[in-house]
Amino acid sequence: MFNRKNFIEESLNESADVKKLILDKCYEDIARAADELVKAVRKGKKILLIGNGGSAADCQHMATEFMIRLSHDLERPAISAIALTTDTSNLTAGGNDIGFENVFARNVEGLGNEGDVLICISTSGNSPNILNAAEKAKEKKMITLGFLGKNNGGKLKSVCDLSVVIPSENTQRIQEGHITVGHILCEITEREIYG
């Protein structure tokens, strides 16, 4: 029989354990990702974000934190960030006309410039539309950051310039780790530039 109390306790403990593992195993990668973001924003470059499903929602969340602000004690200008996951007309036309595996690559082609940052969020690291977009970003000399998880980051890890691989095989814990790392990176970026 399902025990709700045990489930809640186990879920929260597992989440806390994964966060501790992120500190232990991902600190250097997070610091390097922060360096790249700070450098790009200081140069007036933009941040593009892509992901599917829950990761698409994380893209919107993170883009909003960059554009509006995360730290409410700071007065700062917007940091140029666009979630490429939100335009339903664009995504459905692309899916229909050029295939869903190409929708993000097409947007990277149209909106990305040399020195911009593409944040690729994927729990599996194997989504064809994310992989194709990362390849297109490399062609355009953009910086590619992977927020990854299962299977040691999947195929995307070898495509991205830098990846933060959440040390878990549980999709929920990986997604929680992604948004935590996203908050950390946004706050570092805004505080180091505008704090």
Image (spheres, rainbow, N blue to C red):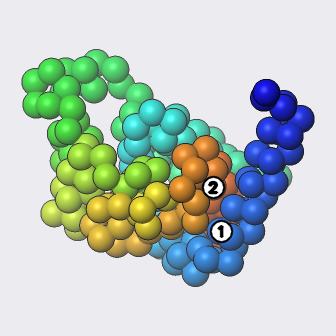
Residue kind at label 2, given as amino acid type: Gly
Image coordinates of residue 45 in percent, x first then y, are: 39, 60
Residues at discs 2 and 1 in contact (Cβ within 8 Å): yes
| Apparent side of residue 98 relative to residue 1 in the rendered image (left or right) | left
| Apparent side of residue 18 relative to residue 85 in the rendered image (left or right) | right
Which residue corresponds to mark 2?
177
Image coordinates of residue 90 in percent, x first then y, are: 26, 25
Residue nearest the viewer, comparing 13 with 58:
13
Q: Quadrant of residue 62?
A: top right
Image coordinates of residue 174 in percent, x first then y, are: 58, 52
Residue nearest the viewer, comparing 34 with 19:
19
Q: Secondary structure at mark 2?
A: helix
Which residue corresponds to mark 1?
22
- Which badge, 2 or 1, comes first in the chain's sequence? 1
Q: Is residue 13 above or below residue 139?
A: above
Using a 10 Å C-alpha cutoff, classify the residue at mark 1 as few (fewer than 14 neighbours), some (14 to 19) or many (20 or more): many
Residue kind at label 1, given as amino acid type: Ile
Using a 10 Å C-alpha cutoff, classify the residue at mark 2 as few (fewer than 14 neighbours), some (14 to 19) or many (20 or more): many
Is residue 152 visible to us here? yes
Residue placed at 58% from the left, 60% from the top?
Answer: 168
| Apparent side of residue 99 relative to residue 23 in the rendered image (left or right) | left
